[in-house]
Amino acid sequence: NRRRKAAELVVGNKLEHSKFSTSDSASSLVTFRTMLPPLSRPYDEEVVRVWDFVHSFSGALKESTTLPSMPSLDTLQDAVNSLKIKSADGKKNRTEAVQLMKGIAITLCRVISPSLTKTLSS
């Protein structure tokens, strides 16, 4: 709830300021965007969602995880990128990415398995 409220405030503030911007400030913004490099790299929306879920519930997932540690956002994005690219050079990275994704999948399945078994058996 707090995250949603914060996101709504940020988006509302951005929309409010964009309604009243003049063409001069818009052109200066474009100039700054071309002069300055991005502050961070772009992330896939799904990667951010998985990372947020895994880290939000890391306390519950630690008991049944097969991963040595919870992956960082950059690690998760690198894994997805290496799975998307089909090159012979990245075979080691691809293997590591598959292991990471498999570890996340196994961890999530271990958490839901007991309640799913209980639901299906009743």
Image (cartoon, rainbow, N blue to C red):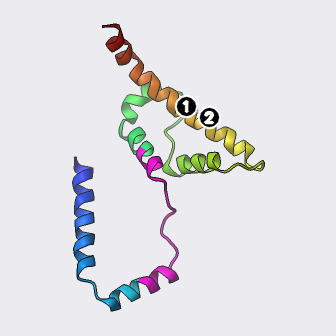
Image quadrant assignment for residue 5: bottom left
> Start and end of the magenta stretch?
30-49
| Label 1 element class | helix
- Report whether 12 appears left or right of 111: left
What residue sits 52% from the left and 75% below the top?
37
- Marks 2 & 1, CB-CB < 8 Å contact: yes
- Report whether 16 appears left or right of 41: left
- Report whether 30 appears left or right of 79: left
Can you name the residue that lies furthest to the bottom here?
24
Q: Which amino acid does label 1 sit on?
A: Gly
Marks 2 and 1, how far apart at CA: 6 Å
Residue 103 is marked as 1
Residue 99 is marked as 2
Image coords of residue 64 (percent x, y): 46, 24
Tell me the crowding category of disc 1: few under 14, some 14 to 19, or many 20 or more residues within 10 angstroms, Cα based: some
Q: What residue type is labelled 2?
A: Gln
